[in-house]
Structures are given as structure tokens and as C-alpha cells.
Amino acid sequence: MQPETINRFAGFFMSSLSITTIQTNLHWEDKTANLAMLEEKINSIEARTEIVVLPEMFNTGFSMHPERLAETMEGSTIAWMQRMAMGKKIILTGSVIIEENGNYFNRLIWMLPDGRYGSYDKRHRFGYAGEDQQFSPGNKRLIASVKGWKINLQICYDLRFPVWVRQQIIPGVSTDPEYDVIIYVANWPQRRNHAWKTLLTARAIENQCYVAGVNRIGNDGNGIYHSGDSMIIDPLGEIIYNAGEKDESHTAVLQKEHLTSVRSSFPFWNDADHFLIDPQ
């Protein structure tokens, strides 16, 4: 399987990448309130940033009522993302419920500042909450390109399945890692926050990349509490930022030199197992 690639600035490279995480409570199944709240938070970002990351299902919360809440790709939430990305000159990402050809998808949108976008449909649906009964699975990864950085985009429960996100180094074809950053958008409950923090760290270490995990806080409409712990982790597994339970936006600057140094100092790829993912 070859991942889809979306290019941000063709032929343009810089050594740093600025990512802003927005950790916040969400209004249950209230799109108008969520978009107004998130617009205020995005407009209040003071630091220079290139990517702004919102939680999973940021306009509704993690609802299993797609028949009431789903939109098409021509709907109001996609239009809002286009307006915000173009107005702030940022890449804006997060997942929403999308209906397409009679199927529902938990779809991450990667919205560029010129109004173009890429998308990733959540591969692993959370059967424990019935997501597998309501939503169709994705069958391809999305690896975006920003200023020479390659970014693997994932959603919540995908975090538990390391093969889906594993770097694929193919002898005789490619000796370079597929990507430099993984972004996970989530609604991950507090009761399993130890797994959230542990697995985010593991994904960074085993793939020798930066990881940014963006979670929500507060109770959802089912009374499930989310404690946040949005995190940014470096390729050695060191935690650069942990939001704890705060309602907070935070901008971190990732350094390509550090990533390159880690990979050259510890060339673990030479000993890796070689495989290809077949999502069918």
C-alpha cells in the first residue's frame, strides 16, 4: 500500500515545524457552539504557527449518532475549516463525521491555507463503544508533506495498533523513514489515560519520530470523563509538552536537526523487520 501524500510547499524546506495543539472541552452534539468556541481559540493564538490540531470529532464530541450529525464534504464544518485555514494562513486538522455514498466515516481533514484538503478515514473503529457498527473503516493512510516534513495522520483508537503506523523501510526501494511526525486526534477517556500516555511514547520511540497527541477534556454526553493529557513527544520518547487537564492551546517548535541526529546516532532501521501493509 502506498500512502497518499499531500504537499504543502513544494520544493521548500525549513528545519523547524510549529504545531499548536488545542485541548478543550466540547459541547455535546452542538456544532454551532463548538465551532464558535474553537474559532475564538484559534483567533487567540499569539505564537507563530503552521499547523493547528483539534481533537477527534471536534464539532460534535465522540457521538454514535452519525445519522443525525453527519455532513458531506460540502457541508458547513468543511466550509468553516476552509475559512479558518485561509484566514489564519495555517493548516487546520481534526476529525468530523462525514457521510459519503450512504456510509459514515470518522474522517480527519487536513485543510490547507489555500482551501485544498486531504483526508484520512479512521481505520480502527472502537468496537467497545459501537463505532464499528456505525462507521465504515478507512483503507489507506494519509502522509502529508509540510516544508520537507512528512506527517502521518491518525485518529484515537488507531494508537493501539502499531503495525498500521509502523515505518516501512523496504530494502532496495527506500532506505529513508516514511515520515517524521505522527499526529493523533482523540477523545480518549481518563479511565484509560495511562495507556494513552504510554502508547504515544512507544509510537515515538519505535518509529524514531515526533508524536503529537491531541485529546479533549471534560465529560461527554454519556458521562464519560476525559482528562486531556495532550502531549508532544520527541523521537527519543522524551516528553516535550503535557497539557495535563488544562483547557489550553500550546505551540511547540519541532527541530529537524534533532530528529536527524537521533536517527543517525541510533540507526535501528538496519535491524528492522521488513513488511508491507495490506489493509484489505
Image (cartoon, helix red, strand yellow):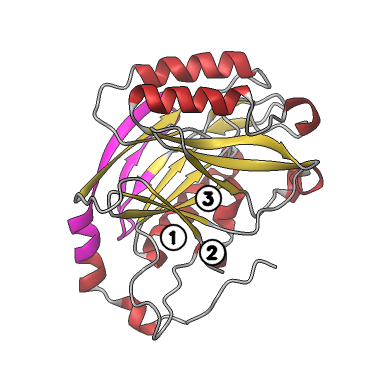
Mark pair 1, 2: CA separation: 9 Å
Residue found 47% across the figure and 82% down from its top: 273
Mark pair 1, 3: CA separation: 15 Å
Q: Position of residue 33 (x, y in %)?
A: 58, 13
Q: Which residue is mark 1?
A: 202
Q: Which residue is mark 3?
A: 154
Give the foreground label among 1 and 3: 3
User: For numbered disc 1, what is the local secondary structure?
Assistant: helix
User: For numbered disc 3, what is the local secondary structure?
Assistant: strand
Badge 2 density bin: few <14, some 14–19, many ≥20, Cα 10 Å: some
Give the foreground label among 2 and 3: 3
Residue found 63% across the figure and 71% down from its top: 278
Q: Position of residue 65 (x, y in %)?
A: 78, 31
| Residues at circles 2 and 3 in contact by the CB criterion of under 8 Å | no
Nearest the camera: 189 or 264?
264
Q: Which residue is mark 2?
A: 162
Q: Quadrant of residue 30?
A: top right
User: For numbered disc 2, what is the local secondary structure?
Assistant: helix
| Residues at circles 1 and 2 in contact by the CB criterion of under 8 Å | yes
Give the foreground label among 1 and 2: 2
> Which corner quadrant holds the N terminus?
bottom right
Magenta segment, which residues?
232-261
Badge 3 density bin: few <14, some 14–19, many ≥20, Cα 10 Å: many
Badge 1 density bin: few <14, some 14–19, many ≥20, Cα 10 Å: some
Q: Is residue 194 magenta?
A: no
Q: Position of residue 227 (x, y in %)?
A: 52, 33
* Camera sees residue 247: no
Q: Earlier in the sequence, mark 1 or mark 2?
A: 2
